[in-house]
Amino acid sequence: MSESSSVAESASPDLANTDTNVLNSSSFWQKPENLLLSMTFIMSFLFATWQVLLNNFVVERAQFTGVEIGILQSLREVPGFLAFTAVFVLLILREQYFALLAIALMALGVAATGFFPFAIGLYLTTVVMSIGFHYFETINKSLTLQWLPKSKTPHFMGRALAIKAIASLSAYALIFIAMDMFGVDYKWMYLLAGAGGLILVAILALRFRDFGHQVEQNKTLFLRKRYWLYYGLVFLSGARRQIFTVFAGFMMVEKFGYSVGEISALFIINYVFNFMFASRIGKFIGFIGERRALIIEYIALILVFTSYAFVSNSHIAAGLYVIDHLFFAFAIAISTYFQKIADPKDMAGTASVSFTINHIAAVVIPALLGMVWIYSQSAVFLVGVVFAVCSLVLSFNIPQAPAAGNEVILGFRGSSSN
């Protein structure tokens, strides 16, 4: 048996519990799941640093309003809309090294952010950071679905969220200590995070071996009719996620006056919850199935977004923010649903196309709702309710046991050739 064909068999469900002795042993560098988690840690640390500082940075240094932050966030999503181009890069670059290069590009964008405290400069550094972020997310999803067996994927993805929580907690704690206690400036925080990310990427590139892939991937653009329900869920997920990512955090600063330290503390609470519950949610999804998991998620989100629209108490708003963030873990079910219905050769190509689908709405929504925000904050969150209702309707069409040829309850079904 070749090395690449045994990749999935080496996956361990207990990755987040890897102890210090294993980390120091040569075997750590021989397992693909450890590479996935290491890359996830670096990416999450970089993005957490960029994100938690952003709202305060743009308000204090660049005097942004809802219009400018909406434009910036729309520009941030343009590389996600263009994620389909990843399949062309794979013609000349292996997925493993493409992922590492993407993180390095993201690190450069983060490092430069603090040195451009004006609209055009922030737009440019955001796009550079976002190109790396979205290419990495695309390739990381493809590698995860290729390298992990179906029975282990939900639990693994839950543990990956726990690793993201650890990375984010590390970033938020560092920011809280450095800025609130020692007065470190924004630009030095961004630079420190970006430079650290580049160093860690170099270590991963030198130490981990080339794991290859289990099945040769289709490296062309395609849409399969039998994946139509997956495409719909991905589209609506991208639409409603933008409302949380862009406007829920911005509301905390603009409406309730949260400081950098308070925002950092709120994010720390979020990721403590993720660290505690994400892997359990992943295991729970594997137990109850994708249909039930997504129904639970979307019912909860309808209630959360409705509450966002009318909240007037800062503490209640913070509670909603934490609950909203926790339910993001249930989105694992969309990916595992696809893994169960997909042809193994379609993982890389569909990961690229699905990220583009996810970001069709994401490119437009922040800018449009940024203008709505000026007149009615409640209306922005009620739009989120509409997206959550549409997602709920689609989730009822997922079979109890999805598989190739049993992709939906109602509507087009096909074979692996469709």
Image: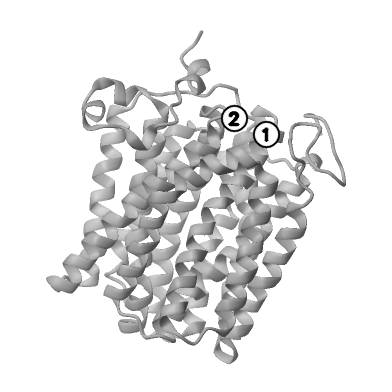
Residue 348 coordinates in the image, percent (x, y):
59, 36
Frontmost residue, 248 versus 401: 401
Q: Is residue 196 left or right of residue 416?
A: left
Q: Can residue 368 be seen here?
A: no
Q: Quadrant of the C terminus?
A: top right
Task: Kindly identify which residue carries mark 1.
Answer: 340
Q: How crowded is the residue under tag 2: few (<14 C-alpha within 10 Å), some, or many (20+)?
A: some
Residue shown at 53% from the left, 56% from the top: 328
Residue shown at 71% from the left, 71% from the top: 386
Question: Do the numbered discs 2 and 1 sit on residues whose CB atoms are within 8 Å?
Answer: yes
Helix, strand, or loop for circle 2? loop
Task: Kindly identify which residue carries mark 2.
Answer: 150
Residue shown at 27% from the left, 38% from the top: 202
Report which quarter residue 81 is drawn in.
bottom right
Taking 184 as reference, is 345 above or below it?
above
Callout 2 amino acid:
Lys
